[in-house]
Image (cartoon, rainbow, N blue to C red):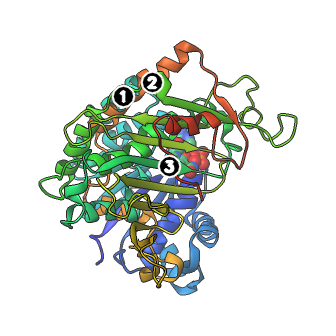
Amino acid sequence: IPVDSFDLVVFGGTGDLARRKILPGLYRRFVAGQMPEDARIIGAARGDMDDEAFRSLVREAIEEFGGKAAQEAEALGLFLERLHYVAIDAKGESGWSVLADLIRPDVVRAFYFSVAPSLFGDLAERLHHYEIATPESRIVVEKPFGRDLESARALNATLALHFTEHQIYRIDHYLGKETVQNLMAVRFANILFEPLWNARHVDHVQITVAETVGVGGRGAYYDRSGAMRDMVQNHLMQLLCLIAMEAPYRFDPDAVRDEKLKVIHALEPVRPEDIVRGQYRGMGKGTEGSYCADAENPDSRTESYVALKVDIANWRWKGTPFYLRTGKKLRARASEIAIVFKEVPHSIFGEEEGWRENVLSIRLQPNEGMTLSVMIKEPGPGGMRLTEVPLDMSFAEALGENGEDIPDAYERLIMDVIRGNQTLFMRGDEVEAAWAWTDPIIAGWDARGDRPKGYDPGSSGPEDALMLLHRDGRRWREIR
Ligand code: NAD
């Protein structure tokens, strides 16, 4: 179903994020027939260029990052006609009147701030000053949303000078993933899972976001943040909230976000012994390829890996730990949430070798999908022996070859902006609450002067992270 007509201004339209995600994503929605014929995308960035030059930059970006849809020459030509470019200076006055004249009065106006957060205030102010933004306009902002509570509050306050909360769309692209939304459907559209979804029946939860890449290329930026700020405060926190939250009274933006916020407020402070930080080593004897070399900071104490045990102090979850881990240069690129259920209260089969707990595994990548492992009798005449089989709830294949046609998180979220649906975007108070929980954890290891533990590239992280679960008689799931 096409959305209403719109003018989408992409500030930073020539940048890396715009070229890799935003513009190819919009193109794929265009090919899918979701963009109205007269919708327009206006790139606004530093650097002089005309519409034609911008179109060829976007053509190249789509050819590189647009997937199969990029081969549809006719569609690509039509899409490029929808593009315009305005050279603009966020911090100066050049270009703003041109943009004011170009933008149409009678369509949805959306402004994607794909620029450094230090420019958010300048953009908001000039959009207001040049009367380009209306009370119905939307702005989209990217991570990082602050680096601690204080800076996040300041950013929220800056945006609030010119925009109300219902106009602000804070992107966490994990929320745009098909499986993440499906998690809500599985939880709240079935009677099967919800009665078991609590500390009485769930032994523990594991959330893993493993990457194979290092920080090379953006080392200097990353060295100022680290895994806790870059991944846990936002992405892993959002996943945790969706698993732990109560049923919202309706699938409505504020109802869902109210429930997520309650989870964040219920998080216990994390004890130092429940945190393991790691930093990847180089491959050989020297430091080549090590985190410190990539970050160009020989004495860096920033973590490229973090694992932590998180407790939620409420009736539903007291006693069921959530183990989170994320890191770079690990064995495989894999993101998974695993709900590990408790043992049966008594085994009528005696000491059964093959017995395993039921696990609901929600894979975000690769091969988005869900699997429920259940125990059955091993087929055949060999007597009553148990075996584990997966009940596969994958939908990638149903949607297209290897799931290639599943819309990317960005394209889905941008269309939600145009529709005016904030359900999958973070509210300002959620972001602040997440920082309020994160800040003391980081302050704690800074004050103790903790150094991250080394781990080998291609491994599953530092040894100490294994101990975090062994200590509790549990095991991490394999990263693969
Ligand atoms: P980039 O450096 O590749 O691009 C920056 C863009 O901003 C360019 O188009 C540039 O012309 C424009 N710009 C810079 N100064 C300007 C000014 N004064 N006035 C107008 N335009 C100006 O950056 P990026 O990687 O595309 O990142 C953009 C934002 O998205 C950042 O906040 C970044 O943290 C965030 N982000 C990026 C990624 C990613 O994968 N690249 C992922 C998540 C979040």
- Report x, y in % for residue 172: 41, 49
The front one of 350 and 92 is 350
Judged by depth in the image, the label closer to the viewer, 2 or 3, is 3
- Residue identifier under label 1: 437
* Quadrant in which the N terminus is drawn: bottom left
For the residues bearing labels 1 and 2, Cβ distance under 8 angstroms: yes
Packing grade of label 3 (10 A; few <14, some 14-19, many >=20) is many
Question: Considering the numbered disc 1 on the image, is that residue within a helix, a strand or a loop?
Answer: helix
- Residue identifier under label 2: 441
- Report x, y in % for residue 62: 58, 70
Question: Tag 3 or tag 2, which sits nearer the N-term?
Answer: 3
Spatial separation of the CA atoms under disc 2 and disc 3: 19 Å
Judged by depth in the image, the label closer to the viewer, 3 or 1, is 3
Specify whether residue 107 is in view: no
Packing grade of label 2 (10 A; few <14, some 14-19, many >=20) is some
The front one of 346 and 46 is 346
The three-letter code of the residue at mark 3 reads Thr
Mark 1 vs ligand 1: CB below 8 Å: no
For the residues bearing labels 3 and 1, Cβ distance under 8 angstroms: no
* Quadrant in which the C terminus is drawn: bottom right
- Residue identifier under label 3: 208
Question: Considering the numbered disc 2 on the image, is that residue within a helix, a strand or a loop?
Answer: helix
The three-letter code of the residue at mark 1 reads Trp
Residue 226's place in the image compared with 182, above or below, is above
